[in-house]
Amino acid sequence: MSYLLRLRELINKPSLVDFSGEYMALDQSDLPPLLIYDATLALELFKSKFLTPLNFIGYFKKLLRLSEGDLPTIDAIFEHAPIMLHGERHLIARKDFILQFKIIERDLMLFLPQYTQSFFREWASKKQLSPIEFTQNYIDGAFRGIFEKYLNIPYGGLPALPPKIFFLAHTLPNAGEAEDCLNDLKVFIDQRLEAQNRNASEAWALLAMLVLGFEPLEGALMFGLMRGEEVDIYNVENFLRESAPVNFLGRVATEDFTIGNFSVKTGQEIYISPVLIHQKSDLSSNGRKENFSFGKGLHTCVGQAISAKMAEHFFGELQKYSHLDFDINHVRSIRDFNLTFFKK
């Protein structure tokens, strides 16, 4: 498992990466995992039919010294979410998720403007603000609004949302708390869907959006709060490219294949890093600035539009409150599974 720690080190210290190349091995084994940071190669790999998504939940458990049977609700979410599926199962799940996410996007636009305005008014009178608390509360409220609107339940009727999940500093009790919260939420959603004679599979879209979307979105908004003077937070597409909150996208080869001079063996793991791809692209002179923050190809994130809308409204409203004083000096970040901010 040391190669995952090596992966995290390279993502956090890009100066260790030789950007004159396209990729590098993460260890010296006979079948080394590969870190990809070249845009052209990454695009070809995303299109390859010989790669399938990595079940990184298994690695996550090992790194946290969890047993295989731990976190069953999180396991089940990934068994249904298109991001972890391949082939026909992926296409079916993606079709269902896109239909449900379109409904969520529609509902989001009905309440997000008013919610954002109310949220900023509520926090405007406070003294020095914790950017972490501010951002977490904004996203928590927005996700609660999404769930309440989708499930036709009154304000405040939703159980507690889980704490951070994919952060390697977690201990077993932290991960267990997240699992318990998700299980309670799943039971609640199932009951609401059954009472409304709706398809029980709709629960997986909501839970996947929460598990896969909350932390990356938090990382992106925090990035903007911390570095607003360095990046254009009002150009949402460029801003999300700069933040690149999901740090790597894992794949594993189902058979041997070759792309140009790049060869992969069956079972070999590949980690494509959006943030490193962006940094290498920015160093080049060809002006190509593709955005890999949401992946590419068939596995492009289905929640991309939702994330963009939330970021647009958050920073659009922030522009009206230039007096807000955020205590950024006691916050630091690390690129873990996602871009994560925490108190020093």
Image (spheres, helix red, strand yellow):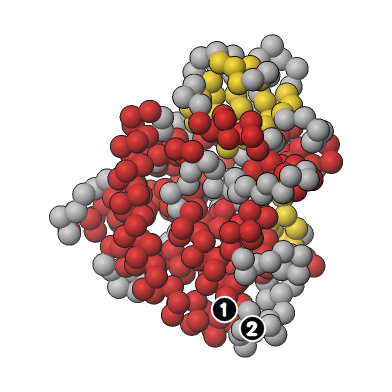
Q: Is residue 184 visible?
A: no
Give 97 or 300, whichever is nearer the viewer.
300
Q: Position of residue 274 (x, y in %)?
A: 64, 43
Residue at the outermost front position: 286
Residue displayed at 80% across by 67% down = 329
Horizontal relation, residue 3 to residue 206: left or right: right
Q: Position of residue 294 (x, y in %)?
A: 54, 47
Q: Position of residue 181 (x, y in %)?
A: 43, 53
Horizontal relation, residue 330 to residue 153: left or right: right
Q: Is residue 43 visible?
A: yes
Hey, what amino acid is under mark 2? Tyr
Does 111 sit above or below residue 269?
below
Q: Residues within 10 Å of mark 2 (few under 14, many from 20)?
A: few
Residue displayed at 33% across by 29% down = 88
Does 82 sit above or below residue 144?
above
Residue displayed at 21% across by 49% down = 199
Give 342 or 48, whichever is nearer the viewer.
48
Q: Residue 321: which disc?
A: 2
Give 45 or 123, whichever is nearer the viewer.
45
The image quadrant that residue 79 belongs to is top left
Element on which disc 2 rests: loop
Quadrant of the image for the N terminus? top right
Q: Residues within 10 Å of mark 1 (few under 14, many from 20)?
A: some
Residue displayed at 54% across by 68% down = 312
The answer to whether the residue labelled 1 contacts the one labelled 2, judged by CB atoms less than 8 Å apart, is yes
Hey, what amino acid is under mark 1? Glu
Quadrant of the image for the C terminus? bottom right
Q: Which residue is mark 1?
A: 317
Distance CA(mark 1)–CA(mark 2)? 7 Å
Q: Position of residue 302 (x, y in %)?
A: 43, 49
